Amino acid sequence: MLSKVIETALNEQITIEFESSQVYLAMASWAEVQGFEGVASFMYAHSDEERQHMLKLLKYVNERGGHAKVSKLNAPPVSFGSFKEMFQNLFDHEVMVSGKINNLVDITLKEKDYATHNFLQWYVSEQIEEEALARNILDKLKLIGGDKGGLYQFDNNIKMLTVETTDNL
Ligand code: OFO
């Protein structure tokens, strides 16, 4: 059985994961209207992944005798400047989420909820991967700079990356 403190904290994380999904969906749509199919499919897949993160938490809360809430979400931005800015935004967002996960882990220790502590380890590892991936993409974009051909190539490469990541899910 979850304590009220843990239930509330997990419910807040459900909203954060859902909002992450919304942010990446907005990025996907923006990239798509710019004609960057690869970046768009990467973001659509990433948005789906965040929805899975949200669902995994939701099911856990209900399974442990709590009640997972589906709350109102903040609207994400409509446009994102440049790809470099967009991926910087993605990286910053993931760093923020990692901080939230770390806080949650901290709360489980204070509450002596070792089952939830164990459950959250999956999210801890996931955040390491997501930050590394975003950092990697950002480094590539910094190298490309404003080169149009480079961006076209980047779009093609990221399409392949999406196929690999989705295959690994
Ligand atoms: Fe849910 O991992 Fe990103 O935010």
Image: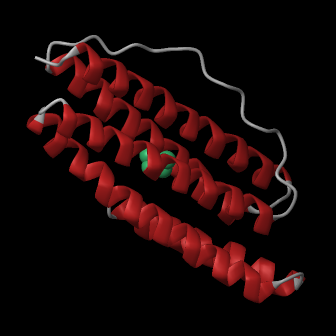
As rendered, which of 128 and 148 lies closer to the eye?
128
The vertical placement of 88 against 121, above or below, is: below
As rendered, which of 12 and 76 lies closer to the eye?
12
Q: Whole-percent x and y of residue 105?
A: 27, 43
Total numbered labels placed on residues in the image: 0
Q: Is residue 158 left or right of residue 28?
A: left
Q: Whole-percent x and y of residue 31?
A: 77, 55
Residue found farthest to the front? 110
Q: Specify the quadrant of the image occupied by residue 59.
A: top left
As rendered, which of 11 and 55 lies closer to the eye?
11
Q: Residue at x 79, y 38 (%)?
A: 77
Q: Specify the quadrant of the image occupied by residue 7.
A: top left
Q: Is residue 119 left or right of residue 104?
A: left
The vertical placement of 114 against 12, above or below, is: below
Screen quadrant of the N terminus? top left
The vertical placement of 149 against 26, above or below, is: below
Q: Residue at x 72, y 27 (%)?
A: 75
Q: Residue at x 52, y 51 (%)?
A: 46
Q: Whole-percent x and y of residue 166?
A: 41, 59
Q: Is residue 100 left or right of residue 19?
A: left
Q: Is residue 145 left or right of residue 46?
A: right
**Can the viewer see residue 41 in this picture?**
no
Q: Whole-percent x and y of residue 117?
A: 18, 41
The vertical placement of 16 against 137, above or below, is: above
Q: Residue at x 40, y 66 (%)?
A: 129
**Can the viewer see residue 26 in this picture?**
yes
Screen quadrant of the C terminus? bottom left
As rendered, which of 34 and 22 lies closer to the eye?
22
**What colour scheme was applied to this rendering of the protein?**
secondary structure
